[in-house]
C-alpha cells in the first residue's frame, strides 16, 4: 500500500498530520494559504519538497474557491499570497523557487481572470505529479551510483531526519534512494537517527521504514560515530537537502554537518539527495544560507501518547512533558550546513554531481 501524505482533488486539499504520527494517521484539511502557512510553520507538514507543493496547492484551492473581477486582481492576489507563504520556512529553497515560478507564470498568462486562475491551478497540480517522478529518478540515479561506487555486494545505510513520502509528494529523496537500493536487493540494513529535537527520524522515517517492510534500526543521534566504528558494513550515509549552494555546501536538518565529519573519518560515502529545485545557484556558499531558529519548547518538551504501567500505548491520551531544568537557556537552530568538501556526491533527478579533479562541483550543468 502506497503511503499517501498529500490528498488533493480540485477544490480540496488534506495533508497527513505529521505531529500525530506515528500513533495516529489523521488528515488535516487545508482550505487556504493561511491554513498552509500555519501547517508549515507548526510542522504539521515538513520536508522541503512537500512544503512547496502544499503551499502551491493550498493557493490553488483558495483560487478555485474565490471570485475575481479581473486578471490583474488574480495576479495581485497570487503575488501577495506567495510572498506570505514563503515566510513560513525561509531556509528551504524549494518553496521560494516554486513561488517565483508560479508568480512569473500568472504574470505572463494572458486572458481573463478565469484563464489566469486555470493556468495557476494546472501548474500547481503539475508540481505534485512531477515531484513523484523526480523522486523516483533520484532513487534510480542513487542506486546506479551506489553500484558503480560501492559495488554489487549488500551494504547498510545510515540516514537522518525524514526524506521520504512524508517529506515529498511521494517516494522520497534520500529515503527514495534507500527504497531503490532495497528494491534492487542491495540493501542489508537501514539505520535511522532519531533526529532530535523534533524526532522526525523516530516518528516519521521509522514509520515509513516499518510501513515498507525495510529492515531497519533506530538509534540516537549520539550513537552515529560508534555505529560506524563497529558496523563496517555501513558504506553510505545519505541525507536530504533544504538548500544546496552553488559550490555544493548543503543545508539540511541539524545533525547533518556532524555526520559529514564522521563519514569522512570512517571512510563512509556521504551522499546528498536533492531535486534540482533545492539547488540555489544564486547562493555561492553555505555562508549565505539563512538558518532558521526554532522555538525553545521543541528542545525542552516532548509530546506523545501516555504509556501505562504494563507498557501499553494509550493512543487516546496524549500529553506534553517538560524534560529539562526550568529556566535553562536554549539554542535551537533547525538546520546546519555540510561543507561541499565532505560530500561525495549530490544525487538529483537529472543525474549525479561529483567533484572534478579540483574538488569542485558544477551544479549549474544540472539546471
Image (tube, grey):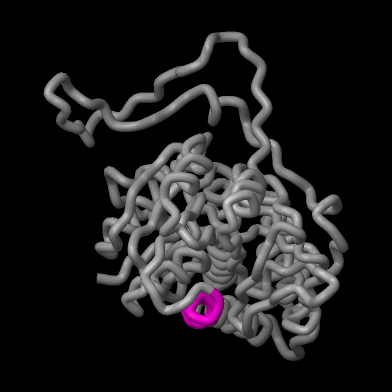
At x 81%, y 76%, the residue is 357
Percent position of residue 262, x then y: 60, 47
Horizontal side of 282 relative to 332 (left or right) equals right
Magenta region includes residue 314:
no
> For residue 138: magenta?
yes
Q: Nearer the viewer, residue 91 or 120?
A: 91
Q: Which residues are magenta?
A: 136-149
Could you tell me which residue is drawn at 79 percent across and 85 percent down? 108
- Name of the residue lying farthest toward the bottom: 111
Residue sitting nearer the eye, 79 or 315: 315
Residue at the far top: name it. 326
Residue at (40% x, 73% y) in the render:
181
Location of residue 251 (image quadrant) = bottom right
Q: Main secondary structure of the magenta part?
A: helix
Where the C terminus falls, by quadrant? Answer: bottom right
- Which quadrant is the N terminus positioned in? bottom left
Q: Position of residue 63 (x, y in %)?
A: 59, 70
Who is closer to the viewer here, 290 or 187? Answer: 187
x and y percent of residue 147 in the render? Answer: 48, 79
Residue 95: x and y, percent?
A: 67, 63
Is 304 placed left or right of 36 in the picture?
left
Residue 267, by quadrant, is: bottom right
Vertical comparison of 199 with 66: above or below: above
Q: Let me know if residue 292 appears in the view.
A: yes
What residue is drawn where x is 54% and y is 42%? 42
Amino acid at each position: 500500500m502506497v503511503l499517501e501524505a498529500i490528498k488533493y482533488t480540485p477544490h480540496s486539499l488534506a495533508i497527513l498530520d505529521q505531529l500525530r504520527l506515528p500513533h495516529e494517521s489523521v488528515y488535516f484539511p487545508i482550505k487556504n494559504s493561511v491554513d498552509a502557512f500555519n501547517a508549515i510553520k507548526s510542522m504539521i507538514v515538513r520536508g522541503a519538497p512537500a512544503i512547496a507543493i502544499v503551499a502551491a496547492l493550498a493557493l490553488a484551492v483558495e483560487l478555485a474557491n474565490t471570485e475575481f473581477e479581473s486578471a490583474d486582481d488574480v495576479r495581485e492576489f497570487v503575488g501577495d499570497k506567495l510572498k506570505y507563504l514563503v515566510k513560513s520556512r525561509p531556509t528551504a529553497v524549494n518553496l521560494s523557487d516554486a513561488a517565483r515560478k508560479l508568480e512569473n507564470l500568472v504574470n505572463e498568462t494572458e486572458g481573463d481572470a478565469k484563464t489566469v486562475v486555470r493556468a495557476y491551478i494546472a501548474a500547481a497540480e503539475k508540481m505534485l505529479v512531477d515531484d513523484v517522478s523526480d523522486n523516483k529518478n533520484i532513487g534510480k540515479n542513487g542506486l546506479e551510483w551506489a553500484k558503480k561506487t560501492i559495488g554489487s555486494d549488500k551494504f547498510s545505510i545510515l540516514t537522518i531526519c525524514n526524506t521520504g513520502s512524508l517529506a515529498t509528494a511521494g517516494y522520497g529523496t534520500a529515503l527514495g534512494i534507500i527504497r531503490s537500493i532495497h528494491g534492487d536487493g542491495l540493501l542489508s540494513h537501514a539505520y535511522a537517527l532519531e533526529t532530535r529535537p523534533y524526532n522526525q527520524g523516530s516518528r516519521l522515517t521509522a514509520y515509513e521504514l516499518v510501513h515498507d517492510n525495510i529492515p531497519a534500526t533506530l538509534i540516537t543521534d549520539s550513537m552515529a560515530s560508534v555505529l560506524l566504528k563497529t558496523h563496517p558494513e555501513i558504506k553510505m550515509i545519505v541525507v536530504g537537502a533544504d538548500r544546496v549552494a552553488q559550490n555544493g555546501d548543503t543545508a539540511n536538518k541539524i545533525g547533518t554537518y556532524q555526520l559529514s565529519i564522521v563519514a569522512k573519518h570512517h571512510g563512509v560515502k556521504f551522499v546528498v539527495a536533492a531535486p534540482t529545485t533545492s539547488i540555489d545557484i544564486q547562493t555561492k556558499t553555505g555562508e549565505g544560507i539563512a538558518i532558521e531558529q526554532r522555538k525553545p519548547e521543541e528542545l525542552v518538551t516532548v509530546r506523545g501518547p501516555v504509556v501505562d504501567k504494563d507498557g501499553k500505548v494509550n493512543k487516546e491520551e496524549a500529553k506534553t512533558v517538560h524534560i529539562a531544568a526550568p529556566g535553562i537557556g536554549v539554542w535551537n537552530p533547525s538546520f546546519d550546513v555540510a561543507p561541499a568538501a565532505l560530500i561525495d556526491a549530490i544525487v538529483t533527478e537529472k543525474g549525479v554531481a561529483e567533484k572534478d579533479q579540483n574538488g569542485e562541483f558544477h551544479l549549474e550543468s544540472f539546471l
